[in-house]
Every structure is written in C-alpha cells, then in structure tokens.
Amino acid sequence: MATNNGVCSGGLIVSFGEMLIDFVPTVSGVSLAEAPGFLKAPGGAPANVAIAVARLGGKASFVGKLGDDEFGQMLAGILRENGVSGDGILFDQGARTALAFVTLRADGEREFMFYRNPSADMLLTPDELNLELIRSAKAFHYGSISLIVEPCRSAHLKAMEVAKEAGALLSYDPNLRLPLWPSAEVAREQIMSIWDKAEVIKVSDVELEFLTGSDKIDDADAMSLWHSGLKLLLVTLGEKGCRYYTKNFRGAVDAFHVKTVDTTGAGDSFVGALLCKIVDDHSILEDEQRLREVLKFANACGAITTTKKGAIPALPTEPEVLSLIHGK
C-alpha cells in the first residue's frame, strides 16, 4: 500500500468509471497505421486519478468493471500494486477489458481508436455497486465515458446519488473522447446532463470550446458553465497553466516548463493532486491564496506527468513535485 506521509489528507477518494489498456506505438510521431509495433500502457482517466492520489500518499479506491481476462487481472493488479483499494472492482465473465490504440503525433497530441463492443466497463449495473464503499468516500470523482451506454449509465447515476447523499464532494472531469459517442450533439447533451450535480469541475481548453461552442477561451465562456451548486470550476490550458473560477474570485496559475514527451494522464494527475489537497478541507476552495498554492502543486504534478511515456509510470510522488516547485 502507498504510505501516507502526512502530506496528503486522509479522507477516501473514490474514482468511478473505466480502466483500459492503451496500446501506444513504439515510435512517436506516426499514425496508427504506420506504427511498427505497440506497447501496452494501462490507462483510463478515473483509474489514473485513483493512482495519482495513492502515489501522493492519499487514500484511493476505484469502482469499475474489468473483463475476467488476462488484461483485466493485470489492471486490477496494477491498482493494488499502486496502493489503490480494489473493493469496488468487478469482473465480467462475458465481456473483454476495453482496449484503445493511441498514437502520439509529431506535435505530442493524441489520436485514439477504441475496441469496446461492448467492453466490460460498459456492463456495470446499479445492483453490482459496492454502496458501502461509495458511502465511505469523502470525494467521489467521475468522467463522462460511463454515461455513453446502459447499464453503466444507470450505475453511474446511482453511484453519484449515493455518494452525494453520504456527503461526498462530487468531482467531474468530462474527459471528452468524441470517437466513443454516437455524435457530438449526444456527447454535449449527456456531458451536460449531470453538470449541475458536481461541486468541482475540471475541463480542458478543448472541452470548454466544445461545450460552449466558442473558439476563444475567455472568462465569459467559462462562467457560462457555472451553476449555483458549483464550488470550483477549473480550465486547464496545457503549457499555459490553468484558470480557476469560484463564486467570489477567479484567476490563473502558470504552468511549470518541462520537456514534454507525452501528455497522456497530465489532467488526471492534476485532478488527483487537487482532490488529495482539498478532500479534508473544503475551506481551501474559499481561500484564494491557499487555493492558488494547491493549484500550483497540481500544475507541477501535471507537468511531471508529461515528461515520461504513459500515464501511470509518470504520475509523481510528493518529493518529486516539491523538487520541481522549489527548482531543485
């Protein structure tokens, strides 16, 4: 188990959703068709967030379904090895673990091709949820991929409702993957269908443009997504850092400049760091100075994650983050 060195707070952070295997070309900067070979890299945004939390010394658990196959068992093992509780993991006898082929183009951005027809994560039912685990969460984090099809969508809605009733902070990162949705319209509609439930929302600049239909990132666009129950809205801007919005203040925090190799998992690392720091002290969300410190830390986590290939191997520990912040 990951040891808690007192740096991260102690409340349980539960991540809900998909875990899959990304197949990444052995050579960067090529299309999937041109790739000479592929390396398997465990992934799935909610699982990345859980491991990011554990790596920083926090308490993390993952709720989701894997195929009862070699890949599914491997992924469950990776969660356990990284100190994430597996009490919420289920295995499906009849469906495979999801796969995604991901290529890093020459500009470092990603291109996806998914194999899910259906994959095990899509078949999680409301009755299979470990409600006791979900009720014990102090923060409950999720994306939007679990909203695409039934029965997983109903399981997602029930898990959110149970977590909310038990007093968990609801954290949402839509993590838009357009190729998985029937259409852009359906994606936008479903992502927004649970928008007003979340108290912390993180979107990338690309997702903000997609959701608002605007091609410029400004405060008015961001605030058009505000709702009365929201405590913090974050827009991540890659190498330009992040912007933050609360009821009472807004601002920006600069990024750390590093040699970027692969952007996979940077946003998940950012979210894990944020949740770790606020899970036991929501008052940080109302104190701009303390929030800025937390976002600086989260930016550093995101930056470090881009310096290696693959999300999980690159997720940082607290000492690595502090040494980047202090320029050691």
Image (cartoon, helix red, strand yellow):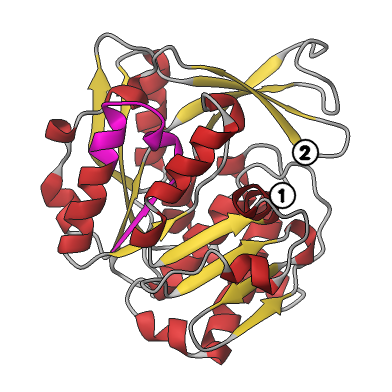
**Distance Cα–Cα, label 1 vs label 2:** 11 Å
Q: Residue at x 52, y 19 (%)?
A: 99
Q: Are marks 1 and 2 in contact (CB under 8 Å)?
A: no
Residue 89 position by quadrant: top left
Position of residue 35 in the picture relative to residue 63 (left or right)? right
Q: Residue at x 44, y 66 (%)?
A: 200
Position of residue 145 in the picture relative to residue 310 (left or right)? left
Q: Is residue 253 magenta?
A: no
Position of residue 245 in the picture relative to residue 236 (left or right)? left
Where does residue 185 sit, x and y in percent of width and height?
Answer: 55, 35
Q: Residue at x 84, y 53 (%)?
A: 259
Q: Label 2 crowding class (10 Å Cα cut-off): few <14, some 14-19, many 20+?
A: some
Q: Which residue occupies the foreground of this view, 143 or 267?
A: 143
Label 2 sits on residue = 109
Where does residue 258 sit, x and y in percent of width and height?
Answer: 81, 59
Q: Residue at x 15, y 32 (%)?
A: 128
Q: Which residue occupies the foreground of this view, 211 or 318?
A: 211
Q: Is residue 147 magenta?
A: yes
Where does residue 246 sit, x and y in percent of width and height?
Answer: 51, 80
Q: Which residue occupies the foreground of this view, 95 or 192?
A: 192
> What's drawn in magenta, residue-wise?
139-156
Q: Secondary structure at mark 2?
A: loop
Q: Identify residue type, mark 1.
A: Thr
Residue 155 position by quadrant: top left
Label 1 sits on residue = 306
Determine whether 208 is above or below 42 in the image.
below
* Total marks in image: 2
